[in-house]
Image: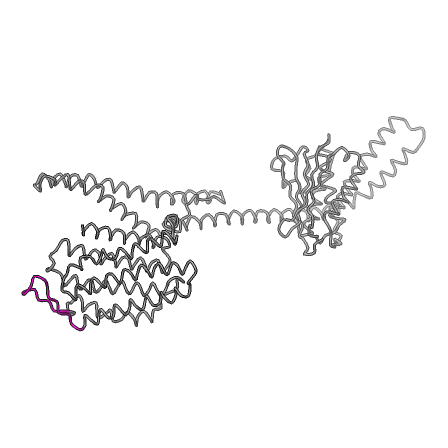
Amino acid sequence: MVLVLNIFSLLLIVALGFYIFISDPRSRANQTFAGFNIFLAGWTIKDIMLWEFGSELHGLHWWLAISFCFGLLMQYSLAVFAWVFPENQRTPRVKAAVLFSPGLVLMPAAISGFLWNRDISTSSIPDFKLDPLAYLFAAYIAIISIYGVAILMSKWRQYRGSATGRQIGAVLAGIVITIVLQVAAVSSSIATGNVAPLRFTSILALPGVAVFAFAILKLRLFSLQTVLDGFRLLPIGYKTALQIATVAICSFIFIQLPIVWWAFGEGHDVYAWKKYVVLSIISALIPNICLALIVLRTYSRPLRRITVAAVKVTSGEHGAQVETRATNDEIGILGDAFNSMSRKMAEDIARLENITSQLMRTEKLAAIGRLSAGVSHEINNPLSAMLGAVRLLLDRDGLDPHVQTELRRISQQIERLSKVATDLMDFASSRPSVKTSVDINTLIIDTLRILSFDPRFKTFAVTTELSRNLPRVFADPERMQQVFLNILLNAKDAMDEGGLLVIKSDVDGEFVKIEMSDDGVGLPKDDETKIFDPFFSTKPEGDGTGLGLAVCFGIVTDHKGTISAKRNIPHGATFIVRLPSLLLRN
């Protein structure tokens, strides 16, 4: 019965230490309390080894020596725990060195047997005569214990009434109960010379452990989900060691013990050993397979995902992501870092391509603008003279009707050439903008009022969604109205049989965003960026010069803004203008 209780005590102590550690493996307080439980587990193991598998006389001096050492180590852990909990602060190294230095002398003295004299020749019960050094050792353990409890008491008074205070109180209760019961058992054994109480020192630790476990469950200091989350945050080294230990323990309980029982149940002859060896070799495959699967799941699969994603990125698929679990081990950190790097790379490349496109378009516009200025100047004057001469001819009486038809056709073509020349002049115009504080909503309404005089616009359904309290922009109202007019006139041409025109304004970060959408013929695929190139037009030949949107691009760029277009689903197009906003609001 005592053996069962000791084993149960050992398992409970180890489970509690693991439970506390796994809840936050990077907490110094949790690490220290786990260390305290390790030493308490060592205390229990030495009790089991002496009282269940050895003589009370043989090796008893070793039991006392180990008891002194483990008792001191537990109090060291208690002192460190008191220093770091609950603030998770560092251990004061100088103070620890001074306080713990006597242990460097006392523990070797205990192991060497200098704390007592042992005489087993006169009695079946050993007669230990303790030296003064043993009493000094016991007093030193008591001082460290009292010191740690005093620190925790002061912190309990500091945090009293809070959740942290209740946690410290639960820790104090468990530690004090454990220390009192174990010291009482050892002291009574030494005082009476009876070793029987010593058999129960490990079991007497159970009340303190139970009090702490009760505090964890009732006060909800931790939870099962916290433990599972903590396991995911463990580094790979800790996680692998824990996995291997779990497989080894399960293999021993569920495989090795049944094999021993079946092989040696009828004796220990050669045949029994043969069965044991053969079955052990065969059964060893099971934990090895389990370990292989664990390694595959823990290392191989996530590393393969990262490798595949890296190959995709090198092949040009910028922004490729790795599906990783939320872990804080090295592989989890590597996966998160790779995802961040890949996203940043994709964003930087997209931004660089946009900047390059803007620069190329700006350089193209500048070059074509210089050419257009010269060409329009050279052809505009001759065209004006030709148009005047044709009109004079048309005013003459008695012209042949066929001649009049041809002259009107010539006049139309000259007017078309003159319009092209005028567009070229507008495109090449470099007059400075007269910028002021502008209310974009008012400018949109004024533009729509101008277009309302066009009979074709009366066939359209116009919807406006203008944001209230829209920030004002620093812009040239005439030139920005030219931008809106060009976009809306293009929408009119795209909706020959009427349609819906939606105009929106809103705030987009530090910009004012204007969207103008139609449900017309839309844009050809991959033409969203080409439409701002000079002389590029989606209209039938002869219906446009392809300079209107190029002029819009130049005006918006001059205002430090952006203009873009996108295809609507299922048909139509949306033009988006973004202009820097002013701090001044309506």
**Residue 387 image point, x, y percent:** 85, 38
On screen, residue 231 above or below 67: above
Does 238 lie within the magenta span?
no
Between residues 229 and 488, which one lies in front from this camera angle? 229
Q: Total marks drawn?
A: 0
**Residue 456 image point, x, y percent:** 77, 34
**Is residue 174 found left or right of 86 in the rendered image?**
left
On screen, residue 303 above or below 185: above
Q: Residue furthest right?
A: 397
Residue 34 sits in quarter: bottom left
Q: Magenta part of the protein: which range?
A: 116-132
**Is residue 477 found left or right of 401 in the rendered image?**
left
Q: Residue at x 29, y 71 (%)?
A: 99
From this viewpoint, is residue 329 visible?
A: no
Q: Residue furthest left?
A: 121
**Residue 226 image point, x, y percent:** 39, 50
Q: Residue at x 49, y 45 (%)?
A: 319
Q: Residue at x 7, y 61 (%)?
A: 124
**Residue 239 image point, x, y percent:** 33, 50
The coloring applied to the image is one colour
From this viewpoint, is residue 509 visible?
A: yes
Between residues 86 and 361, which one lies in front from this camera angle? 86
Residue 289 sits in quarter: top left
